[in-house]
Image (cartoon, helix red, strand yellow):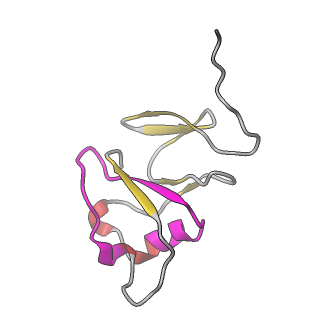
Amino acid sequence: MKFQPDSFDGTNAITRQDGGAVWVNGNRHEGPLLVPWRGAVSAWGAIAVARLEAAHFDAVLALKPELVIFGSGARLRFVAPARYRAPSEPRSELTVLIAASM
């Protein structure tokens, strides 16, 4: 039996990751990225977890994601909810996975 991965034209697939880069559709990228399931992969202005602001997360939410995988670096770090959500603003429910790779 031979297994074949599903492939959907026009979608972004993370094909590889190591300590310094992520490959999306076979192309190497370094640094923080926004990878929508369709469309252009772009740099994300986040430099370090401690410097994240609501505007960084607004860029993520503008893509209307159903799921966000957030890499925080070699150490697992959590972002304070106040940094990514203003309490007075209603937002749709969003699932966030936290991974160590920023």
Please tell me which residue is depicted at 38% across the width and 73% down the height of the picture: 84
Relative to 71, residue 80 above or below: below
Please tell me which residue is depicted at 26% across the width and 44% down the height of the picture: 74
Check residue 72 for magenta coloring: yes
Give the image location of residue 98, x and y in percent. Answer: 35, 53
Q: Residue furthest top?
A: 1
In the figure, is residue 55 to the left or right of 83? right
Give the image location of residue 46, x and y in percent. Answer: 41, 62
The magenta stretch is 57-83
Give the image location of residue 40, x and y in percent. Answer: 67, 53
Relative to 3, residue 59 above or below: below
Relative to 35, residue 54 above or below: below
Where, by quadrant of the figure, is residue 78 drawn?
bottom left
Q: Residue furthest front?
A: 1
Where, by quadrant of the figure, is residue 64 drawn?
bottom right
Report the quarter where the N terminus lies: top right
Give the image location of residue 77, x and y in percent. Answer: 24, 56
